Image (cartoon, rainbow, N blue to C red):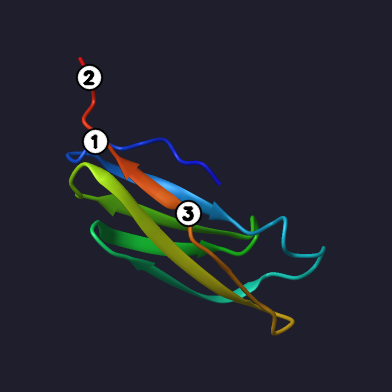
Amino acid sequence: MTWTAKDPADVADYCIDFSAFLPTGETISTFTLTATGVTVEFSNLDTTAKKVQARLAGGTVGSYPISCSIVTTAGETFSVTPTLNVALRKG
């Protein structure tokens, strides 16, 4: 999973897509999202699209792991940890 880098001043929405993990008819029951070094302004669950969405703010130049774990309606658990890169925007 690759996200576009954000500037430290940006407040932007990011999506973690679990649809590749889940068979037809199975959805996400609950999720846990953890971020260190950036602020999670809010997060929510899109059960129809099988995605977790988060609005992330702050950070200094560097890379930050954003951990997300889900539990499905079938009781399965999946976790991913994409990296959010924070970089100064040129120009």
Q: For the residue marked with disc 2, what is the amino acid?
A: Lys
- Residue annotated with mark 2: 90
> What kind of residue is marked 3?
Pro
Choose the circle earlier in sequence order: 2 or 1: 1
> Pointer 1: what residue?
7
Image position of 69 (left or right of 84): right
Residue 9 placement (x, y as % from top left): 17, 39
Locate residue 74: give its quadrant.
Answer: bottom right
**Rendered view: 10 above or below 50:** above
The residues tagged by marks 3 and 2 sit, at their Cα atoms, a distance apart of 24 Å
Q: Residues within 10 Å of mark 3 (few under 14, many from 20)?
A: some
Q: Which residue is mark 3?
A: 82
Asked if residue 18 is positioned above or below residue 27 in the image, the reply reads above
x, y (%) of residue 28? 63, 71
Q: Using the rendered view, name the quadrant where residue 18 is placed.
A: bottom right
Say which amino acid is labelled 1: Asp
For marks 3 and 1 on the same chain, the one whose residue lies earlier in the sequence: 1
**Residue 30 location in percent, x, y?**
54, 77
In this picture, residue 65 sits left or right of residue 82: left
State the CA–CA distance, disc 2 to disc 1.
Answer: 10 Å
In the rendered structure, which disc, 3 or 2, sits on the residue that comes first in sequence?
3
- Residue at 48% across / 54% down in the picture? 82
Disc 2 element:
loop
Point 42% across, 51% down: residue? 83
The reply to whether the C-beta atoms of the residues labelled 3 and 2 are less than 8 Å apart is no
Of the pair 78 and 47, the residue shown nearer to us: 78
Near-viewer residue (64 or 16): 64
